[in-house]
Image (cartoon, rainbow, N blue to C red):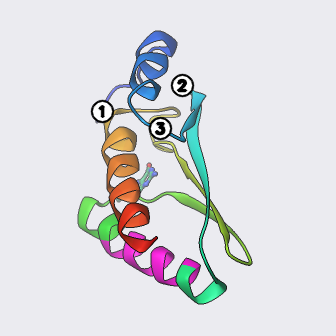
Amino acid sequence: MADVLTAEAVEQELGGLAGWSGDSSGISRTVELASFPDAIAVVDRVAVVAEELDHHPDIDIRWRTLTFRCVTHSAGGVTVRDLALARRIDEIVRSAR
Ligand SMILES: C[C@H](O)[C@H](O)[C@H]1CNC2=NC(N)=NC(=O)C2=N1
């Protein structure tokens, strides 16, 4: 299993992940899409990637605003798997707006 990253490592990684914030207990990003259907389409695409990676974000849906939170629940903190998932979420969001 991937190790939980140190607070310093997470902070450094966040420097390269625009829009993401957090610490070693979890990283999150909130995005607003143009409409509710657009937001749900993003969730749907993230679901496909999450299954592919066997790693799943916590997702909060409020009309057209989505908050993604990435933490490796089994490890109890942020691991490299969360950073990989965050990058994939960014790709999907980028192509959706
Ligand atoms: C068996 C399966 O690999 C685990 O349940 C996975 C699935 N997706 C997961 N996703 C996240 N974010 N954390 C986990 O610990 C986790 N565990």
Callout 3, which amino acid?
Answer: Ala
Of 71 and 45, nearer the camera is 45
User: Quick one: which residue is furthest to the left in this view?
Assistant: 52
Q: What residue sits right under mark 1 in the picture?
A: 2
Is residue 55 among what the camera can see?
Answer: no
Q: Position of residue 76 (x, y in %)?
A: 52, 34
Where ligand 1 lies, by image quadrant?
Answer: bottom left
Eyeballing the image, is 84 above or below 56?
above
* Mark 3 neighbour density, 10 Å: few (under 14) some (14–19) many (20 or more): few
Eyeballing the image, is 32 above or below 45?
above
Q: On the picture, is 69 further left or further right than 80?
A: right
Callout 2, which amino acid?
Answer: Ser
Secondary element under disc 1, as helix, strand or loop, is loop
Q: On the picture, is 87 further left or further right than 28?
A: left
Q: What residue sits right under mark 2 in the picture?
A: 24
Q: Is residue 85 magenta?
A: no
Q: What residue sits right under mark 3 in the picture?
A: 18
Callout 1, which amino acid?
Answer: Ala
Q: Is mark 2 within 8 Å of ligand 1?
A: no
